[in-house]
Image (cartoon, coloured by chain):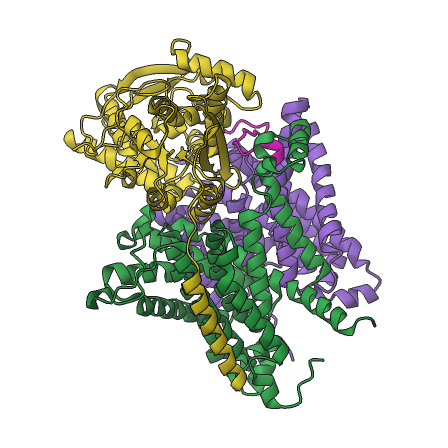
Amino acid sequence: MPFGQLFVEGLAIGACYGLFATAVVIIYKTSEVVNFAQGEMAMFSTFVAFHILNFYGYPFWMAFLITMLFSIAMGVLIEFLFLRPAKHPTILGMIVITLGAEMFLMGLASWKWGAEQQFFALPINPSVTYEPIKGMIINNWSIAVLSVSSLIMLILFVFFKYTRLGTAMRATQQNKNAAKIMGIRTERVFSFAWGFSSLIGAIAGMFFASRATLDPAFMMEPFLRAFAAAVLGGLMSIPGVIIGGGLMGLIENYFGYIWPEWKPIVAFIVIVLVLCIKPSGLFAKHYVKKV
Amino acid sequence: MDMKREYYEDVQLFKSGVVLFWSAALLLGLFTFPLYAPNYYIYLLNVIMVHVILAVGLNILVGSTGQISLGHAGFFAIGAYGTAMLMSTFHIPFVAAIIIAAFVAAFFGFILGLPALRLEGPYLAIASLGFGLTIMHIIGAMKIFGGRMGLKTPVLDLGIPQLGLSLPVTNDLQKYYLILIIAVIMVVGAVNILKTRVGRSFVAIRDSDIAAEVIGVNLTIYKTLAFAVSAFYAGIAGGLFGFILGFFDPFTFNMILSIMFLVMVVVGGLGTVSGSIMGATLITYLQYDLFKNIAEVPYFGKFMLYISDKWFTTVGLENFSSMAIGLIMIGIIIFEPLGMFGIWIRFKKYWMTWPF
Amino acid sequence: MDKKKLFVAMVVLAATVAWSGVSLAANPPGFDDNEIRIGQWGPQTGPAAPWGSVARGSKLLFDIVNEEGGINGRKIKYFIRDDMYNPAQTSAVVKELVERQGVFAFVGGVGSATGMAVKDYLAQNKIVWVGPSAADDNFIKPLNPYLFAVYPLYKDEASILAKYIVENLKSKKIAILYQNDAYGKDGLDGAKDRLATYRMQFVAEISVEPTEKDLGSQILRLKNSGADTVLMYVGPTTAAIALKTSANVGFKPQWVSSDTLSDYPLMFKITGGLWEGVITGAFGDIPTSTTNKYVVKYREAAKRLAPQERWGTFYMAGLLFADPIVDALKKAGRNLSTESLLKALNSVKGHQTLGPPVTWSEKQHQGTDSVMIQKCGPNGSYIELQGWTKNDLATWNK
């Protein structure tokens, strides 16, 4: 069993899950909504980047910047158009709205770009490999995903801990009405959260697309895994989520090596078992409800 | 208007003669529906009624008890596989087989209910999602269930063929009446459950589980019971669904199906039986019929083809249906958080108090 | 409580009225003096939508037939229905076509489970179904008088490919990566049977879920097995991920794959060029062929009649699967009926256009077991390695 190689592979894909899971967590942290449209938002942004690259022929950095702006705008817009008008929504109602947004985006993308798989490449050559330790081959894609997700993680950690907006986001999650009384414009906080989340999702989407293929359904499976990783990490703490993602990738790869047939569900089984012991995930404080 | 003055008023099945009249009229309409409806709607109606049974059961869990489940396709699968296997392998008559299969599903519901004692919200969602995926995967891995190749259902026989009492149900129309009768029984059953001590315990748990425990509701029993009851409904629905299809494989019971079940319940209206019926009907209809073959619609189809040619792709035009369903779902929740039941209530109030 | 009794009484009354009064109306006929109605289901939306081009390919064939004046004075009216690869929806759309539109025959139809869901219904209603776009034993055994298969069985193809690997590639260590469904399992079985005749075994048998996006551990298993050739029975996305991941971990075997991945331009594009050198089976002739007159004719017609479509393998497969029915309808003559069409189809012998020769008889409705073996050249071009080859180990004709 190539322990070292599996570790590299598991960690790389795990970092990708973790990165995408932070997008889920940012929205959950502010509004307690699990955004089921997250995967399709990332998919749509990646398609926009693909479109700019292939039909307008812009260089990658330019396409990347435009896509980032687009994804922020899309996140803000979806929140503004679909979630904000809902009056007194229940949590489940909000979930159904995000599911509706998911179907809408998926339909729109299939209509615009067709269902056939497309090729999407980052400006890194994934076939360039290094072998720092014997038996541990690491390639450019893994290095890129590990460094980008660590960087984003760091930024987010500092952001939530030390900036005013970050504090406002946490306050909004803890008690929306109290936050309002303290002078926080919670609507604006939601807009920021959705914009941020959409942006991080788009970056993760590009990583997934360059590893697999780009088609309208390509983010469904990664979204589920990212959501599970977020739950494993506790849905609240950013470092917890990235550790959850890493664990997810490692568990899947080690178990998947021994029993390939059970690879798709082993992570879910482990998560259910973990949740039975720690009901709020690994890294979130478990609040005891008061009556 | 909805003020109750005494206990019996609360527990009776029909609030008034008016409700009774319209319920009976609806049923009469459904029973005679094939007389004036085209044939091909019968199949769609069968699927709708199966989804109604499931949605009513899921609503007991989601709407009345306040738990969430993204794994109901798993129970649905247990019902379908269980019924078909019991009939073809063990030669058990249909009625017994479907009930046994539903109890098996209920047992698995009880098992899923155990982690639910500690989990809530998204944590429970992921746990139930994992459950649904696991069921699908285990069925796919086992040869006796036909594995990934799928399973063909035996002939649906209401009698006991071993004793010479054969009463085969073959075409969609006969299946329609069978499913309709079972659906009526299940719906009336759900209405009744919610009016008993059990139902009120469920609602108490939803409103506040700690307060419920304080007033003497045993959380362990009632939470797992809620899962078991709704899994029972899913099992019955699954057993019937298998016969509607005639052939199914594990992928038929995928996660998207679980999500759509949840959508049916929420769009219909949480915690109401009539809401689930409306939600299941609407969502199933939208998925199967709305904006299909849009290019063949007169005028509008031409217009859409023109737009597709200009800005989109003609090959992807069929996806317009999925976009429309998404927007309808969003619209209903935005304008009426109580779902279709809320729209119905508003409509009724407006009607009853008109012109004031 | 008397309300309840009244209610029950009404239900019983309604039930009796309904039981006695209703019966199924007859389906509308599938053709009239001016047109013959033919339908096809296929995923146009949802995760399986890339296969949707099969149904649209058949449309091109019927457009060409209509342009040439139709069949014995009748035009073909063709319906495509989207089933989202979901058997429940397949039943709905097929019933709609049969009971509302009145359809004479079906062609193509992507998917094993979707086809199985409507197979018996079509036979009961005496509707001919030609060229299912899936190879499934259950379609041909037991013999279904209304169902005619064109697609070579995956088992046969895997057997031919395994023979090619052992005899022509001289490979000693072969591994298989297969999709965890009917398609992948059939490929596994067929290849295993062939290897058994050489007293060989796979050095690794690795399954993947069709939807899986991370194949790191599976590829490492293949790498560690020391395989020099890997046979693939997977979908296009999975194959692309497998090749990319292998390149990332420095694993470079000879890839051999089933005919579902014989769309080289697409595979070359989505793997970023890694597909070059991959050997696949093929159920149809080379889409860029200049020697096959049918391929040339249809390709030119596609440029004119369906400029928005890509002339790929699956689009062409739509024509290939539907092709025999046009011929049979012409033979059945102006005096058309289901019986005359069945008679014409049962006497099809060595009919060859875009693919292998197809032969049907009263007792045998699997048209062929021949596949071609092709190799992907530079820029997704096609190189023919081996012409139409029959499987000498085939079991369906025994």
At which x and y percent is residue C61? 46, 23
In front here: A212 or B194?
A: B194
| Colour representing chain A | purple
In front here: B309 or B12?
A: B12
At which x and y percent is residue B289? 55, 48
Toward the bottom, the furthest residue is B6
Magenta segment, principal secondary structure?
loop
At which x and y percent is residue C244? 46, 31
* Magenta stretch holds residue B18: no
Up the image or down, B181 lies above or below C242; here it is below
The residue at the point 52 percent across, 31 percent down is A116
Residue B295 seen anywhere in this rendered image of the structure: yes
Up the image or down, C363 lies above or below C276; here it is below
| Quarter of the figure that contains the C terminus of chain C | top left
Toward the top, the furthest residue is C291
In front here: A90 or B234?
A: B234
Q: Which chain is yellow?
A: C
Q: Find the magenta span and give its range.
A: A111-127
At which x and y percent is residue C381? 44, 15
Q: Residue A185 appears in which quarter of the rendering?
A: bottom right
